[in-house]
Image: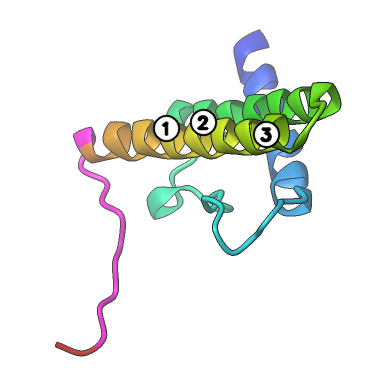
Amino acid sequence: MRKLSMFLCLAVAGTATVPAIAHYDAETHAVVRSEPIAGVYNKFWFNYLADVLEADKELKSDLRRATDKEDTRDAWEEYEHELVDADKDYVKEMRERNYVVGRVTIGN
C-alpha cells in the first residue's frame, strides 16, 4: 500500500511538473514524455517520471552552483544526457513487454 501511494504521489508530481519545466534552448533539448507508451501506467512509467524529476532537481542544483558559461553548458548537457537515458530505459522496458512506440512516417 505504501509503494502504491508513493507511486501515485510521484505520478501527480510528475504530471504537474513535466509541462512546467523551463528549458534552456528549447529547440535542441530532449522531449519529456507527457503520456505513457500505449497508455499503460505501470512501474516503468513511474520510474521514468522519477528519473525526470531527479534530473530536474540536479539541473537546478548545478545551475545554482554554476560560476561561468561553461558550467552552465555542462549542466544542460548532463541534463540532456539524463533525459535521453531515462527515455531509453523506459522504451527498452516497454518493448520487452511487447508495448511499442508508435511512429508515423509521411512520404517515401
Q: Do the numbered discs 2 and 3 sit on residues whose CB atoms are within 8 Å?
A: no
Labels 2 and 3: the sequence-earlier one: 3
Residue 25 in the figure: left or right of residue 88: right
Question: Which residue has dot 2 on it?
Answer: 82
| Residue that badge 1 annotates | 85
- Secondary structure of the residue carrying tag 1 is helix
- Between residue 61 and residue 9, name the one nearer to us: 61
Badge number at residue 70: 3
Disc 2 marks which amino acid?
Glu
Q: Is residue 8 left or right of residue 46?
A: right
Does the magenta segment cover residue 101? Answer: yes
Answer yes or no: do the residues labelled 1 and 2 have beta carbons within 8 Å? yes
Magenta-span inclusion, residue 104: yes
Give the structural element (helix, strand or loop) at label 2. Answer: helix
From where the camera sits, is residue 59 visible? yes
Q: Position of residue 65 (x, y in %)?
A: 82, 21
**Identity of the amino acid at label 3?**
Glu
Image quadrant containing the C terminus: bottom left
Instruction: Please state the extent of the stretch shown in magenta in the rendering.
Output: 96-106
> Closer to us: mark 3 or mark 1?
3
- The quarter of the picture where residue 2 lies is top right
Q: CA distance from mark 3 to mark 1?
A: 22 Å
